[in-house]
Image (cartoon, helix red, strand yellow):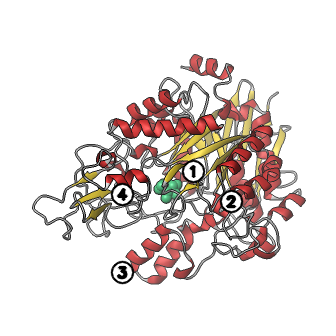
């Protein structure tokens, strides 16, 4: 295996292993035309920022034509751009501009479901149409009147709350939607569906895109027949167990078929599969070099450590640092010899990491953001930076239900308060976990609307943009931005950062995150205080770093005896 890996590496077939990806959520990135919504031209106008940061790949959340029920993850035309975001010509210009700068473009591929306004689904509503079988239609539960309460074919809950089945009066049947009712699931069992998806992917590759981030891709193969699951406590008798719908029996067959039909491996295209309920063993199989399925996957395991087990993410629990370290280490060890990791703290679905696992007070925001960046970027895998993370942007700070726009948050508020949960507890859950935390506009300047738009932003700009903004960050050598820029540079410059073997130190320590990466006689030592208190280490807790080169640090003259709050440093031992 290692030989195969080395061979492919030699042939440059794994260029993405030394890359850092920057994710753009176009709606919130930069608005060029004053309608309050970010657009492709806004991205083109800000490419200097990305070049200065040094990222290699841009991943764009969906910009395709869409009714925007789930902000573009509900696509009604895969080969057109929504007028909100611009035109195909704008995308061609973006691709050319990126390629000219030596950067690549990765598009979001959302093919577990389409919009209910996609022509395929419009046709599918007619039981006589040859598209009927393109989606997952089922009759009412046996013994129930179609449309009656409890008549849904299974007890599955949609991830956005409520039943995963929508009754269609005209045909007397139900269609499956694991997300909103405007996002019907495609039926991947039907070969015509699969061929249509591959043709669309090829169309984008021919247009110049360099790969795909695949939305909830391990939901495409469902275990048949579809049957009831164990209800999740307190959620109206519905089953929200992703194990019921994820990693189905034909998943690897579909992924291999897609890989071959689009030439994903052969054309050295970048692929990352977003996967619910994926564990290390699955990931090793899906990302093995011998598999020709995916380059890497996104796991959710480390994102569920600050919630109560078995219930929705809005039921909070404090993060216990040893759990986080254990989980990250499990993935580092598990994919050390075969497969590949993606590394992320943030994306458009997660709250801001500095507010979540760091300390976003005035005193520690900058240092904790830097340290969180360090402990992630020094791991083995491909790191992702989500827009604004490089500025240390914080959560939205909403206190009222009316401030939320996201469909998941709005639905949860409605359902939870109707079920009698105290409003205060619901708002606390939303403030910590709502996806809107990631979606407030990028803070470019201290000026009106943070320089995001000349109009009225679709989601209010965070008031802290007067101090936290890209202009200020770029001008300040001690900013989070320049720290991230250096971290990205370290990956490019040091093979030990890309390839070194990982070992976790002090697994049970409640404040310190420390690990080594070893390649030949080089040892990279990362030591980080992940708390807002000073921490004293004992001699021998971490390897001797006397005389070692300090590659990056939060403070001048770092030591490993007494670590100041959120202090971290990376040492290179050996030549
Ligand atoms: C995962 C995406 O990241 C999320 O934003 C979206 O709502 C769901 N998939 C449905 O497409």
- Assign the C terminus to one quadrant of the image: top right
Query: Between 243 and 208, which is closer to the camera in this rendering?
Result: 208
Q: Is 165 drawn above or below residue 548 in the view shown? A: below
Question: What residue appears at the point 54 percent right and 33 percent down from the top-left corner?
Answer: 335
Q: Nearer the viewer, residue 309 or 104?
A: 104
Q: Position of residue 117 (x, y in %)?
A: 43, 59
Q: Which mark, residue 39?
A: 2
Which x, y percent locates residue 178?
Answer: 37, 56
Disc 3, SS: helix
Q: Which residue is mark 3?
A: 418
Q: Where is residue 310, by image quadrant?
A: bottom left
Q: Residues within 10 Å of mark 1 (few under 14, many from 20)?
A: some
Residue drawn at the location 44% of the way across and 39% of the way down: 196
Query: Separation of disc 3 and disc 4 at Cα?
Result: 22 Å
Q: Which residue is mark 4?
A: 177
Give the mark nearest the N terminus, 1 or 4.
Answer: 1
Helix, strand, or loop for circle 1?
strand
Taking depth in this image into account, of 314 and 458 the one nearest to the observer is 458
For label 3, count other residues whose C-alpha is less than 10 Å away and answer few (under 14), some (14-19) or many (20+). few
Q: Which residue is mark 1?
A: 80
Task: Please tell me whether mark 4 sits on a helix, a strand or a loop.
Answer: loop
At 29% across and 46% down in the image, what residue appears?
A: 133
Real-space Cα separation, disc 1 to disc 4, in angstroms:
23 Å
Nearer the observer: mark 2 or 4; the answer is: 2
Q: Is residue 562 visible?
A: yes
Q: Marks 1/2: CA distance?
A: 14 Å
In the rendered image, the vertical position of residue 451 relative to residue 507, given as above or below: below
**Image quadrant in which you'd find residue 348:** bottom right
Between marks 3 and 4 in the image, the one whose residue lies nearer the viewer: 4
């Amino acid at each position: 295996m290692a030989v195969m890996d080395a061979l492919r590496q030699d042939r440059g077939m794994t260029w993405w292993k030394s890359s850092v990806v920057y994710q753009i959520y176009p709606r919130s990135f930069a608005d060029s035309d004053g309608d309050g919504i970010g657009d492709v031209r806004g991205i083109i106008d800000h490419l200097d920022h990305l070049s200065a940061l040094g990222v290699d790949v841009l991943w764009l959340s969906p910009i395709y034509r869409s009714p925007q029920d789930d902000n573009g993850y509900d696509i009604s035309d895969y080969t057109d751009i929504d007028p909100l975001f611009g035109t195909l010509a704008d995308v061609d210009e973006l691709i050319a501009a990126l390629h000219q700068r030596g950067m690549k473009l990765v598009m979001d591929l959302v093919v577990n479901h389409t919009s209910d306004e996609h022509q395929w689904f419009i046709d599918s509503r007619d039981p006589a149409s040859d598209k009927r079988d393109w989606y997952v239609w089922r009759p009412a539960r046996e013994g129930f009147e179609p449309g009656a309460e409890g008549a849904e074919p299974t007890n599955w809950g949609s991830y956005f709350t409520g039943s995963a089945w929508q009754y269609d009066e005209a045909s007397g049947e139900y269609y499956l939607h694991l997300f909103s009712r405007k996002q019907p699931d495609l039926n991947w069992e039907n070969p015509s569906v699969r061929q249509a998806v591959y043709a669309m992917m090829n169309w984008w590759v021919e247009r110049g895109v360099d790969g795909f981030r695949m939305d909830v891709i391990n939901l495409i193969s469902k275990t048949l027949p579809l049957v009831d699951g164990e209800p999740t406590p307190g959620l109206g008798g519905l089953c929200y167990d992703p194990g019921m719908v994820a990693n189905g029996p034909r998943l690897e067959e579909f992924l291999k078929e897609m890989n071959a039909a689009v030439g994903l491996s052969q054309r050295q295209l970048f692929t990352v599969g977003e996967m619910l309920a994926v564990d290390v063993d699955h990931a090793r199989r899906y990302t093995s070099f011998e598999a020709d399925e995916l380059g890497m996957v996104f796991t959710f395991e480390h994102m569920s450590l600050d919630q109560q087990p078995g219930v929705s993410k809005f039921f909070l629990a404090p993060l216990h640092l040893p759990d986080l370290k254990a989980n990250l280490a499990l993935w580092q060890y598990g994919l050390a010899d075969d497969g590949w990791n993606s590394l992320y703290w943030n994306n458009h679905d997660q709250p801001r990491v500095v507010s979540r696992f760091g300390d976003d007070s005035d005193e520690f925001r900058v240092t904790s953001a830097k340290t969180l960046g360090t402990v992630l970027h020094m791991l083995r895998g491909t790191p992702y930076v989500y827009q604004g993370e490089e500025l240390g942007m914080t959560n939205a700070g909403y206190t009222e239900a009316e401030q939320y726009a996201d469909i998941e948050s709005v639905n949860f508020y409605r359902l939870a308060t109707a079920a009698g949960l105290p409003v205060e507890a619901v708002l606390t859950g939303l403030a910590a976990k709502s996806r809107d935390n990631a979606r407030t506009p990028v803070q470019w300047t201290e000026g009106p609307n943070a320089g995001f738009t000349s109009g009225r932003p679709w989601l209010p700009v965070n008031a802290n943009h007067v101090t936290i903004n890209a202009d200020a960050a770029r001008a300040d050598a001690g900013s989070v931005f320049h720290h991230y820029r250096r971290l990205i540079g370290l990956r490019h410059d040091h093979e030990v950062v890309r390839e070194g073997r990982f070992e976790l130190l002090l697994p049970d320590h409640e404040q310190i995150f420390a690990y080594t990466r070893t390649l030949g006689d080089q040892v990279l030592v990362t030591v980080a205080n992940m708390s807002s208190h000073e921490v004293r280490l004992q001699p021998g807790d971490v390897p001797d770093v006397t005389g070692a080169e300090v590659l990056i640090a939060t403070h001048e003259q770092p030591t490993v005896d007494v670590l100041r709050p959120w202090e971290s440093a990376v040492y290179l031992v050996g030549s």
